[in-house]
Image: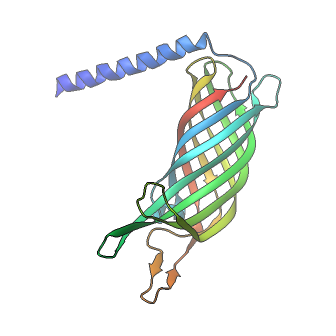
Amino acid sequence: MRRDRGRIGLGAVMVVGMALASVGEASAQYERGPGAALHVNFVVADAVGELGYAVDKGYGLELGAGLPIGADGHLRLRGDLGFSVYGLEHIDYCAYGCRVSSTLTTANSIVYGALGPEVVLGTGPIQPYVHGSAGISWFVTSSSVDDHDGFGPYLETTNYSDTVFSWRVGGGLRFAMGRRVALDLGVTHHDHGLTRYLTQGDIVDNPDGTVTMFPNQSEADLLSFKVGLAIRLR
């Protein structure tokens, strides 16, 4: 056990050492000063407060851009557009003795866009930053049918949706990995206020072919954790 712990500790030290060496090497190449950048992030969304009792974690993607509005590049105008799926339900159907099969997939998602200022607290190879923004979030539940022919879903409908105003505040660190690319690690709090939404199991198919929905209404705050790349433009 001690030998295993020693190996794990040595491995961790090596990983940290390689990361610091990479940052140190990148610092000689990284361009300082103002510059526009694109951001591509993988996002894990953790529901907090009342929403946390109704849904599990969500996963998605976020695209963004930052444009310097100050001479030194510390103040930027930041825009983000992303989505997170917090619930998936699959129901398999078959017909004609199961010679024809299909899958009904219902997805509970949040699609959002926001715009606001970002303050970068450094312009070197390691850049801490904070940001705040306002925007719109769309809580939507949709269903689609896939007949497994390799071309994806061929029928899709929106079952339920609610659009709300949102506030976002967050921060993070960017680590230079080269002249124009940085590793971006961050966290953002999403304040949605009172929102109506569906979760898994809130759509019931009745024997007569009708559908009954049981929407929830509560505060819908999120903490989103992201890891991605910031790509500096010329």
The image shows residue 9, relative to residue 58, as above or below, that is above
**Rendering quarter of residue 129:** top right
Q: How many numbered discs?
A: 0
Residue at image position (70%, 57%) is 136
Closer to the camera in the image, 150 or 122: 150
Give x and y (percent) for residue 6: 24, 21
**Rendering quarter of residue 217:** bottom right
| Image side of residue 203 versus residue 72, left or right | left
Residue at image position (48%, 74%) is 202
Closer to the camera in the image, 234 or 213: 234
Residue at image position (58%, 58%) is 110
Give x and y (percent) for residue 79: 72, 42
**Rendering quarter of residue 126:** top right
Give x and y (percent) for residue 53: 47, 64
Give x and y (percent) for residue 134: 73, 51
Residue at image position (75%, 39%) is 117
